Amino acid sequence: MVEPIEGPDRDTEQQPDAERIRVMVVDDHPVWRDGLKADLERMGAAIVVSEAADGGEAIDRARDAMPEVILMDLRLPIVDGVEATRRIVEESPHVQVLVVSASGEEADVLEAVKAGAAGYLLKSATAEEITDAVRRIHAGEPVFTPSLAGLVLAEFRRVAGKEPTEPVLTARENEILKLVAKGYSYREIAGKLFISVKTVQNHVQNILTKLQLRRRYELMRYAIHKGLDRAPEPEP
Amino acid sequence: MDVIPPQVERARRTLWAGLLVFRWVSFAWFAANAILSELTFRYGPLPWIALALTGAWTLWLSVPPENQERPETPWIDLLIAVGLIVISGLVVPPGEVIGETPFFAVSYPVCAALLWGAARGFRGGIAAGTVLSVALVFSRPVNGIPLRDLSHGQVFGLVNGVVYFLAAGAATGVFSLLFARWSEQFRELAASAFHASERAARLAGRESMGRAIHDSVLQSLALVHKRARELAKGPMVPSDQVLELATMARDQEHALRALIMREPEEPPVGAASLRDRIEAMVGSVQEMPVTLSAVGPVWLSAAHVETIAAAVEQALDNVVRHSQATQAVVFADVEDNWVIVSVRDNGRGFIYDERDLREAGKAGLLKSMKGRVEDLGGRMRVKTAPGVGTEVEFRVPYDRAEASFGGGTGG
């Protein structure tokens, strides 16, 4: 169900509603939600199909509204953004979660990315940057900030080499991640390494996948450590 | 979903392995008895078929041993056990009674009672024991001896057998009951230990956070509050005083955020975090957003941190003044025994030529930055071209930086 949009700007390019990216906004501040919604719809590429004020609501409404992209705040009451991201991505893997959070929350953003979020943007980003990020993430391109790239690097170094089966970064992935951390765009990295932008994107996607795999390994290690890995005998 | 703790699981496996051993010993005895006993020869192929069938069944249960725990196993086993008991009535010479001549299947039928107890618990064991007892009693009439004609000794022998079967089923039944209860206790214990440690950690974290907030953030907020009220009383508010308030509020915002967001890290003795130092610095750049991306806290000696931070500050200063950039990123990392710090902007870039720069009178800053890192045994590199922004990279040997805060050996 698509609601009519009031008063679209004449000078921005409007796409028919059916072609717009279906977005859901999750934030506990109504003012922020309204602002984000207005920004996104004014830019013409997206339509806000649902809103939620906490993680539990987000999980429920994502089921009904079927958004393609979810803009997720992390500090949420009841169920936090990391947990909501995990549950939503588990239920519907095709949904792309873009974390939009205040600065200094990178450690939580890292957790959200490990839980399945495909990108991260600061709340101070402009309407253009947010719209661009929604477009990119909808097209399957991970959206990173340099500081998140630094945290991801640190995460891979933390237990590197201790577990032979644990996914580690290839030399190329390491190189690309370092360039992202230094502030280079995918296009600049592609130029520097003489590869296509698409290849850079694929590498970043692989890095994300490995990061999410590592989370599963962590859970598994925890389970084995606590002896929770044995399934019970089936009841006769 | 219930899970079985590994300790309980080990004990359970031991029980099943024990059952298998008992089964093989019983079968060996059964086979020896059948082969050595002249009785067997008198009754045609029936004893041999029973022996072969029992052997095949025992083998199937052992390879792999998990077959013992399949859902259909107890039923087949019980059927075979009942069959053996009935057959043992048939292969005794008419008029003779088991107990006076050796029992054909010896202890093999007991295995069924044991298995039922282990697989289905106490009730299962007793049920199987009862079925076997009934079969035992009926093996007498099969042998041609009416039950009422049994002597006292023969009845005693029968009761003995019944008790034997019931006790076997009950014994393993009690064990599996114990295992279940044991698992439950393990789970509860593990869960409560987990909750307790989590709670303790949370309380400790809250306490230290509370102290830190009280020490710095609350004091500053009180000051901001007081100063703002004072300013409000005056007719004209000087902009520098408002800016001062804003700065104070911003610093505390950063401090509070660092307290809440970042997990406390235990610094090595005498070390300072380059990340934290640069973080404080980039926050004070007003002209453009400057992002810090660091791979960990980067622990260095305080002197190294100050020198590198001074070089970074100069580089940022240069970006602000000349680059026309809209944003900058400072990157800090330790890899392969090098501390690597880069300052990158998206500005206009330039043609890097030291002689040209010297002639234009712009070499002083570069020389100063270069001098700082070279004092630490490091080097500076500038990557730039018109239109692609600029990256200034400092590399400083890490082992030296680390040695100077006395990582341990040599002093």
Image (cartoon, rainbow, N blue to C red):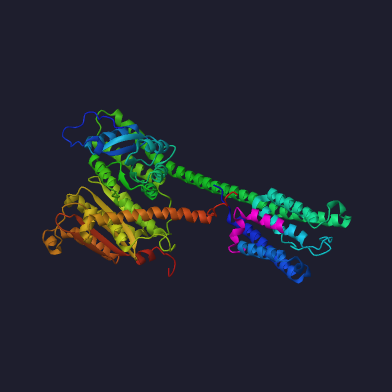
State the residue lying farthest toward the front.
Answer: B44
Answer whether residue B77 is magenta in the image.
yes
Q: Say above or below: A163 vs B223.
A: below
Q: Residues in magenta?
A: B62-83
Q: Nearer the viewer, residue B100 or B235?
A: B100
Specify the quadrant that holds the N terminus of chain A: top left
Q: Nearer the viewer, residue A107 or A112?
A: A112
Q: Residue B16: horizontal and vertical position, in percent?
A: 64, 59
Quadrant assignment, res B249 = top left
Q: Is residue B383 left or right of residue A74?
A: left
**Observer able to see residue B273:** no
Q: Say above or below: A138 vs A178.
A: above
State the residue lying farthest toward the bottom.
Answer: B36
Q: Say above or below: B67 vs A68.
A: below
**Observer able to see residue B352:** yes
x 67%, y 53%: residue: B116
Q: Residue B123: horizontal and vertical position, in percent?
A: 69, 48
Q: Is residue B158 left or right of residue B238?
A: right
The mark total stands at 0
Q: Nearer the viewer, residue A201 or B239?
A: A201
Q: Say above or below: B229 vs B54.
A: above
Q: Residue A215: horizontal and vertical position, in percent?
A: 42, 53
Q: Nearer the viewer, residue B32 or A207?
A: B32
| Majority secondary structure of magenta residues | helix
Q: Is residue A181 left or right of residue B383?
A: right
Q: Residue B40: horizontal and vertical position, in percent?
A: 75, 67
Answer whether residue B109 is magenta in the image.
no
Quadrant assignment, res B393 = bottom left
